[in-house]
Amino acid sequence: MCKYHTSLKRPFFILGDSRSGTTLLAYLLSRHSSVIIPPESNFVQRLINILLVNSIHKPVKKYKLLDIVFSECKFQDWNINREKLENVLPDLVSIKETILTICSFYAYKQSHNAEAFGIKKNLIGIYDQASSLFNNLRVLWVIRDGRAVFYSKKISIKTSTNRPFETNPLTAASTWSWKNKKLENISSKYENTIKIQYEKLLTDTENVLQGICSFLDLPYEGIPHPTVKYHIPDRYKALHKNIGKKLDQSRVDAWLNGLSPREISFYELIAGDMLLKHGYRLMYDHSNLASLFGYTISSAYNFMIYDIPSFVTRLSKYDYD
């Protein structure tokens, strides 16, 4: 085994729907002296695609695997020299060994004394395969009021499309419900999972971080002064413009003024049960569907014609944005 693997003593994933606060949590945790969290990359998903048809331990030519890794544009943000990586990998190497070596190589480069290594990426749909790569893996599940998630998606521009993440409340509600249902299943199947509410992270930051450090078996260091330890590439700076600033508790309820009553009620019609299950109160009584009639006719038609095919497609593939 590669000597760098000692850097992965406490591996963990940060999982949640997009715009749920996973980047904020990564930023706060990366300020801990013993935590390393690299920029987001899709290379793990791309290699796991090969895992789906190959054994996790089956040797593959390293050049083939590294071609896949280095062709992924976001991996360039890890700033790893390919030649140096090739020197520590055997000519024939398993996909598991490749992923562990890359993660360890990055962690060791950042700090020789790193105790915990985190990956922040949407690995929800392939969690079983991803979790098999790491020993003693822990999961930080970040959940945010789905209506706030939808509002954030509505006003945030996706870099790959230059369009809002989502503008249809039906699609947003379905995606949020599906992802958090998957995370519920992960939490019930695997013991090493902790749920973190975005709202509490903003309003009770110190206690939440103290609980996470305990979960990761790390000493709590308080809330340190901001650093640039967690790297956000320039192309995502506008998307994460609040990272590094003073935590703004007004963001918790911003969706109340940002979404129309019809958008809120329609979102609750789809995701109401999941919202209630996780402690979020509903704004409307959906037993009276007549109040929604004017909006649902046109929106439901548009959803069925245009959004259901794309929604199903998104669920059947991995999100590489």
Image (cartoon, rainbow, N blue to C red):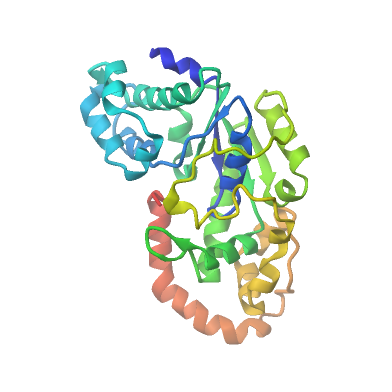
Name the spot of residue 155 as percent of width and height, x first. Answer: 54, 67
**Residue 58 visible in the shown view:** no
Quadrant where the N terminus sits is top left
Q: Quadrant of residue 95?
A: top left
**Residue 270 visible in the shown view:** yes
Q: Is residue 32 above or below residue 145?
A: above
Q: Is residue 321 above or below residue 110?
A: below
Residue placed furthest toward the bottom? 294
Q: Residue at x 67, y 64 (%)?
A: 272
Q: Residue at x 74, y 43 (%)?
A: 205
Q: How many marks?
A: 0
The answer to which of 219 and 143 lies nearer the viewer is 219
The answer to which of 73 and 54 lies nearer the viewer is 73
Name the spot of residue 277 as percent of width and height, x first. Answer: 71, 54
Name the spot of residue 6 as percent of width and height, x first. Answer: 49, 15
The answer to which of 70 and 316 lies nearer the viewer is 70
Name the spot of residue 88 as percent of width and height, x first. Answer: 31, 16
Left or right of 210, for residue 77: left
Q: Is residue 291 above or below residue 137?
A: below
Left or right of 134, for residue 35: right
